[in-house]
């Protein structure tokens, strides 16, 4: 059966751990000069309807690093821009390529592509989820801390796509997650409810960032206005101002806490330049790990086809 990656909810704890184990191995081997040929002769299409630096380049580099090939298509380049039905697009693409990596707006778009595609569809960010990013974030936490199961993770800011995917990861992997979001900017309530029901540790939403980071091992934040919300930027800057990750907030976490940011960062908005450039921030290791986790995702999904 075709194995898609649409949201972390669809995977077991063992499957999520397998991505990370595979990525750690591929990283170690690549640094030792091992030449990988997992995807020799395979091609993926990257269809990106929103901008991307890290996700696009790391997926392309991951594919080349496994001896495969890539076709990149921006939103403007396909007949999707002229409303070709997704079910037609999916069935045609599946005749040309071995996998489809998609960055778009509605989650229903990747879900619909997957419904009709006989090759794996990988979600490279929607308005609702950013599952591949959270896998590289968790890989980074495991590299830094050894394991994630007994850690307390804090999410500060918008209850957005990143927050939703962190919630699903917490439900599956069983770490404690506290999210501090302003009223009106909570994560998706259904995603939260489902994850809380299966979680081994608390997943809670609070209003006070200081309460969320108290005793935290990891502090995580993201932009206040995501792609597609540019018109709300000024209003959000006012509402989210108390949710900035700065030195005062960091001081309330554990002394050895690490700071994550998926990037791009807006310095001195959601995170201060001092914290982003400071010794506790691992955002650039996190960015590197997107390359290794994308290799693992491509190897696992394209092999399973
Ligand atoms: N973190 C992330 O997804 O970055 P890009 O938008 O640059 O891909
Ligand atoms: N929440 C952000 C993540 C960017 C990687 C967005 O969707 O724009």
Image (tube, helix red, strand yellow):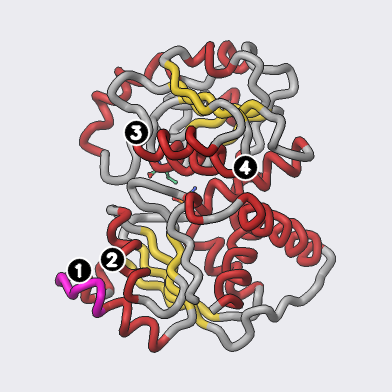
Q: Position of residue 160 (x, y in %)?
A: 38, 37
Mark toward the start of the polypeptide (2 vs 3): 2
Q: Position of residue 22 (x, y in %)?
A: 71, 62
Label 1 to label 2: alpha-carbon separation: 6 Å
Q: Residues within 10 Å of mark 1 (few under 14, many from 20)?
A: few
- Which residue shows up at 33% across the image and 67% down it? 74
Residue at mark 1 to residue at mark 3: CA–CA distance: 31 Å
Which residue is tagged 2? 75
| 1 or 2: tag closer to the N-terminus | 2
Q: Residue 213, located in which quarter of the rendered image? A: top right
Residue where numbered disc 3 is placed: 189
- Which segment is the magenta one? 82-88
Q: Is residue 24 left or right of residue 281?
A: right
Is the residue marked 1 within 8 Å of ligand 1, measured from its CB?
no
Evaluate if marks 3 and 4 touch, with contact meaning CB atoms under 8 Å apart: no
Which tag, 4 or 2, sits closer to the chain's start?
Answer: 2
């Amino acid at each position: 059966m075709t194995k898609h990656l649409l949201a972390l909810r669809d995977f077991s704890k063992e499957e999520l751990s397998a991505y990370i184990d595979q990525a750690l191995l591929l990283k170690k081997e690549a640094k030792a000069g091992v030449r990988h040929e997992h995807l020799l002769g395979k091609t993926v299409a990257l269809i990106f309807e929103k901008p991307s630096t890290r996700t696009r380049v790391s997926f392309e580099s991951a594919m080349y690093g496994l001896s495969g090939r890539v076709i990149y298509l921006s939103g403007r380049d396909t007949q999707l821009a002229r409303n070709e039905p997704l079910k037609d697009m999916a069935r045609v693409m599946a005749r040309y390529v071995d996998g489809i990596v998609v960055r778009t707006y509605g989650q229903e778009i990747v879900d619909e592509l997957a419904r009709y595609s006989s090759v794996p569809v990988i979600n490279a960010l929607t308005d609702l989820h950013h599952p591949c990013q959270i896998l590289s974030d968790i890989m980074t936490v495991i590299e830094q801390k050894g394991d994630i199961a007994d850690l307390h993770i804090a999410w500060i800011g918008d209850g957005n796509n990143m927050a939703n995917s962190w919630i699903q990861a917490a439900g599956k992997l069983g770490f404690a997650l506290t999210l501090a979001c302003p009223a009106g900017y909570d994560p998706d309530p259904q995603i939260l409810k489902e994850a809380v029901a299966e979680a081994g540790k608390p997943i809670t939403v609070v209003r006070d960032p200081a309460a969320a980071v108290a005793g935290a091992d990891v502090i995580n934040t993201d932009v206040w206005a995501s792609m597609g919300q540019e018109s709300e930027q000024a209003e959000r800057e006012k509402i989210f101002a108390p949710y900035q990750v700065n030195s005062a907030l960091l001081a309330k976490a554990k002394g050895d806490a690490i700071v994550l940011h998926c990037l791009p960062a807006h310095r001195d908005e959601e995170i201060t330049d001092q914290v982003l450039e400071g010794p506790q921030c691992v955002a650039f290791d996190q960015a590197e790990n997107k390359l290794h986790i994308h290799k693992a995702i491509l190897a696992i999904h394209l092999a399973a086809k």
